[in-house]
Image (cartoon, rainbow, N blue to C red):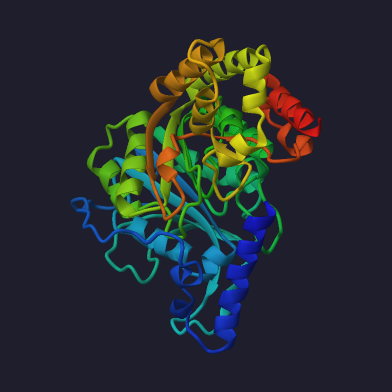
């Protein structure tokens, strides 16, 4: 995890522990109090779906329309602050039906009483079949699997969970949501007890095993985690999911609005992968007043994206003036960036390079073609809301790695994207240009 993100997580955890030591309850150490610059959900009312009868969790149900599998790693400050429990309770406001199965595996480092006096170091994880109830204060869904050894930072554990869900609740369409902290190209799902996390290339390998079990791609793979919607990350998963949903920027502790999202799916289980991806983006955007970015991308378009990006790189490298503009440290620094500084919005970067060049250059033509491909072919749906001085409205749905001063080859070149595109070569040339 990057230093800034790691420090922020450490601060949050220590702050909550300090609050408990002083006798404060868990609510007194809320995420919004500790990190006041993060957005709050809007107060807008969103109608809940009509009640549906929960399907019996123990019976081998007939094939449903949708299976939604949510892997919640709350073995960190997010668990301590109650966000994992809150999201599961949001899911229980909708529950499962004979058309929709919602299954959650969760491990939580949390509080074990209402006064918030005792920190609970829960070993392992529980898997529940989410059933409908109106009590937002406790989880009532039946436990269908217990593990005392589960490591929530292990991609192998994720695979086991998904395989169990696929066997027990067959469905025509499958969505997998990974819930935790994210650090873009560096990884996701940080378990603060085991100290493990999932590197992007290893997560890709895990999803390949899921595809083998399923016999096809997952319909939707979503990350309810910060900073994950990057070109190199999405490309790693392109062969294993039809649609990828993620955020260029941080996601607030409240995460996805699961009641609204699952309510929409429950009311229309006939929606396909792209429709569900769009629904994720739309319900997320409607739930936050500011500082929200989320997009859904079409993985079938990722090979074409790599080709269009390569054409732009080749045009830039063939033109000294364009190359000087594209590698200029000031231009790169001014590009719309996110909490991980080296994660920049690709569309905004292309526009800033074009603004430095004469009207008739081939680089502009290649840039226009790439931007059109991003908007018309790759990005299914995008939402971006500004926050203070952060111009998130310039976030068009896909971030890309552009280092400010040092290229991390050991990490970045593990990704398939660096083998299939010229982007890593371009970054190396950029770093060499900076040294002149």
Residue 364 versus residue 185 in the image, above or below: above
* Residue 345, position as x, y percentages in the image: 52, 36
**Residue 421 seen in the current view:** no
Q: Nearer the viewer, residue 59 or 387?
A: 387
Left or right, residue 274 beside residue 325: left
* Rendered location of residue 241, percent (x, y): 50, 30
**Closer to us: 103 or 31:** 31
Q: Quadrant of residue 19?
A: bottom right
Q: Where does residue 147 sit, x and y in percent of width and height?
A: 60, 59
Residue at the front extreme, as displayed: 358
Residue lying at 56% horizontally and 89% vertically, measured from the top left: 22
Can I make out residue 420 in this image? yes
Q: Position of residue 148 (x, y in %)?
A: 63, 62
Image height of 73 relative to 208, above or below: below
Q: Quadrant of residue 119?
A: bottom right
Looking at the rendered image, the quarter that the C terminus falls into is top right
Q: Is residue 17 above or below residue 7?
A: below
Residue lying at 52% horizontally and 23% vertically, measured from the top left? 354
Q: Nearer the viewer, residue 292 or 68?
A: 292
Q: Residue furthest bottom?
A: 23
- Residue 16 is left or right of residue 194, and the answer is left
Task: Name the foreground residue: 36 vs 172.
Answer: 36
Residue at 51%, 78% (x, y): give it: 112
């Amino acid at each position: 995890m990057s230093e800034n993100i790691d420090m922020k997580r450490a601060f949050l955890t220590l702050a909550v522990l300090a609050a408990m030591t002083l006798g404060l309850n868990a609510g007194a150490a809320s995420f919004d109090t500790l990190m006041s610059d993060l957005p709050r959900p809007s107060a807008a009312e969103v109608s809940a779906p009509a009640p549906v009868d929960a399907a019996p969790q123990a019976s081998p149900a007939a094939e449903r329309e949708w299976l939604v599998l949510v892997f919640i790693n709350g073995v960190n400050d997010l668990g301590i602050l109650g966000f994992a429990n809150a999201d599961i309770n949001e899911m229980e406001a909708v529950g499962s039906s004979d058309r929709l199965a919602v299954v959650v595996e969760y491990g939580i480092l949390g509080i074990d009483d209402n006064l918030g006096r005792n920190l609970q170091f829960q070993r392992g994880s529980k898997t529940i079949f989410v059933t409908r109830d109106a009590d937002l204060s406790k989880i009532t869904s039946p436990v269908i699997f217990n593990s005392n050894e589960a490591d929530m930072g292990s991609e192998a554990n994720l695979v086991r969970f998904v395989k169990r869900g696929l066997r027990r609740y067959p469905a025509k369409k499958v969505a997998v949501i990974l819930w935790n902290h994210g650090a873009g190209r560096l990884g996701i799902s940080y378990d603060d007890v085991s100290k493990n996390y999932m590197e992007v290339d290893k997560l890709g390998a895990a999803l390949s095993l899921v595809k083998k079990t399923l016999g096809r791609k997952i319909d939707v793979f979503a990350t309810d985690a910060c900073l994950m919607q990057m070109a190199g990350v999405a490309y790693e998963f392109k062969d294993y999911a039809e649609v990828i949903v993620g955020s260029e920027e941080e996601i607030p502790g409240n995460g996805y609005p699961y009641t609204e999202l699952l309510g929409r799916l429950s009311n229309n289980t006939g929606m396909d992968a792209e429709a569900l991806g769009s629904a994720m983006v739309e319900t997320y955007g409607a739930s936050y007043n500011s500082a929200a970015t989320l997009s859904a991308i079409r993985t079938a378009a990722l090979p074409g994206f790599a080709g269009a990006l390569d054409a732009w790189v080749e045009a830039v490298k063939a033109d000294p003036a364009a190359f000087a503009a594209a590698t200029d440290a000031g231009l790169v620094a001014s590009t719309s960036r996110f909490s991980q500084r080296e994660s920049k919005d690709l569309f905004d970067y292309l526009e800033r390079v074009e603004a430095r060049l004469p009207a008739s250059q081939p680089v502009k033509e290649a840039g226009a073609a790439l931007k059109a491909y991003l908007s018309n072919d790759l990005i299914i749906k995008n939402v971006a809301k500004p926050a203070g001085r952060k111009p998130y409205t310039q976030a068009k749905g896909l971030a890309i790695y552009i280092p400010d001063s040092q290229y991390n080859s050991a990490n970045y070149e593990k990704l398939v994207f660096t083998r299939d595109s010229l982007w890593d070569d371009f970054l190396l040339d950029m770093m060499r240009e900076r040294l002149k």
